Each structure stands twice: as structure tokens, then as C-alpha cells.
Image (spheres, rainbow, N blue to C red):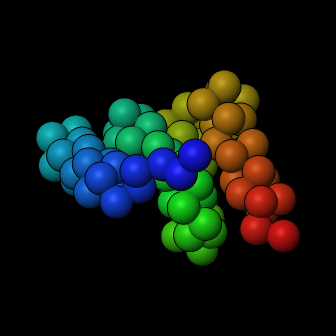
Amino acid sequence: AMGRYDEALPLAERVVRTREGVLGAEHPDTASAVNNLAMLYKAMGRFQDALSLFRRCLSLFHKAHGSCHPSTAHSLFNLAACFISKV
């Protein structure tokens, strides 16, 4: 079954904008929202958009938590999975 991407996308983008505005662009909760938007882009087949956001998410978590934190590792996996899906 196809997802209702046309309804989900503006909501996910709104969450990112809200968290950026309230918490700041580099806050870990903002990074989580960016990750969720990247997952949506990936599901929609918008791989370049997804890759860009997965890279941003990885950078944010690395900056906030370092390279050994589970959130950083999860972001790295999501980036790798997007490369696999793109093939």
C-alpha cells in the first residue's frame, strides 16, 4: 500500500521548522526531526533529498554526542541504508 506522503510531508517539514525555531538548528531533538523527514524522503524515493538530510543528521548527532553515541551510530546506519536503497 502506498503511504499518504502528500499529507505527511508538510507535517514533517513543519516539525523540523518548529524544532529549529524553538530549540535551535543544532539541538539533538531537531536532529531527530531531520532524521524523520529524511526517512520520509527515502520512502518517497527522493534519495538526494534524503541523503542530504541524513548527512545533516549525522553531523548534528556527532557534534552533540560524539562518534560512539547510539544516536550517531543510528544516523550512520540510516545514511548507509539510503545509499543501498538508491542503487
The percent position of residue 42, horizontal first and vertical second, equals: 59, 58
Question: As drawn, is 58 to the left or to the right of 16?
Answer: right
Q: Number of callouts in the render?
A: 0
Question: As drawn, is 57 to the left or to the right of 75?
Answer: left
Front residue (pair 48, 56): 48
Question: As drawn, is 66 to the left or to the right of 73?
Answer: left
Front residue (pair 28, 47): 47
Question: As drawn, is 81 to the left or to the right of 50?
Answer: right
Residue 13 visible: no
* Up-down relation of residue 86 to residue 32 (above or below): below
Tell me where residue 13 sits by quadrant.
Answer: bottom left
The percent position of residue 75, horizontal first and vertical second, equals: 64, 42
Tell me where residue 31 sits by quadrant.
Answer: top left
The single residue placed furthest to the bottom in the displayed view is 48
For the C terminus, give its image quadrant: bottom right
* Up-down relation of residue 51 to residue 62 (above or below): below
The single residue placed furthest to the front in the displayed view is 1
Front residue (pair 18, 84): 84
Residue 8 visible: yes
Residue plotted at (66% across, 25% down)? 70
The percent position of residue 16, horizontal first and vertical second, equals: 30, 49
* Up-down relation of residue 48 to residue 63 (above or below): below
Residue plotted at (65% across, 27% down)? 69
